[in-house]
Image (spheres, grey):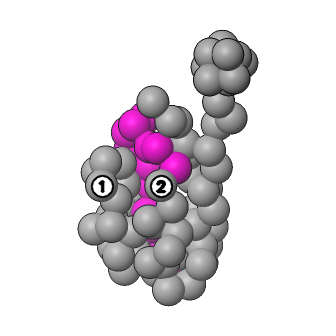
């Protein structure tokens, strides 16, 4: 399974929840904390992110950066063989 993670620019996020709705793994939620602008911001709540980038694509303020873990060496060797 492909693994991913995200980074949210907390101080810019307005908590519009578009990323939460777009996440097929239901990995995102709004935080209990508020940012400097007074908004609750998006946070990763589960460790099942696949790095699909849906959240980043729908974010109107481009505050989400998605990272995907590289394939493991064992999987690459099996594919190349």
Q: Is residue 18 above or below residue 75?
A: below
Q: Quadrant of the N terminus?
A: top left
When the figure is inspected, residue 70 is found, relative to residue 68, above or below; the finding is above
Q: Nearer the viewer, residue 3 or 21?
A: 3
Q: Residue at x 39, y 69 (%)?
A: 19
Question: Residue 3 location in percent, x, y?
Answer: 52, 36
Q: Which residues are magenta?
A: 37-51
For label 1, the residue is: 24
Residue 57 relative to residue 17: left or right: right
Q: Earlier in the sequence, mark 1 or mark 2?
A: 1
Q: Residue furthest bottom?
A: 60
State the residue in front, 52 or 14. 52
Residue 63's disc number: none
- Residue 16 within the magenta-colored segment of the rendering: no
Read off the residue under disc 2: 52
Residue at point 33% right, 73% down? Answer: 17
Q: Which quadrant of the structure image shows residue 23?
A: bottom left
Q: Residue at x 57, y 52 (%)?
A: 6
Q: Is residue 49 magenta?
A: yes
Q: Quadrant of the C terminus?
A: top right
Asked if labels 2 and 1 touch by Cβ distance under 8 angstroms, the answer is yes
SS class of the residue under badge 1?
A: loop
Spatial distance from mark 1 to mark 2, Cα to Cα? 9 Å
């Amino acid at each position: 399974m492909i693994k991913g993670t995200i980074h949210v620019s907390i101080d810019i996020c307005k908590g519009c929840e578009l990323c939460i709705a777009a996440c097929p793994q239901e990995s995102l939620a709004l935080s209990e904390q508020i940012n400097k602008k007074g908004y609750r911001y998006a946070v990763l709540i589960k460790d099942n992110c696949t790095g699909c980038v849906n959240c980043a694509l729908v974010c109107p303020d481009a505050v989400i950066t998605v990272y995907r873990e590289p394939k493991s060496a064992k999987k690459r060797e099996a594919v190349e063989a």
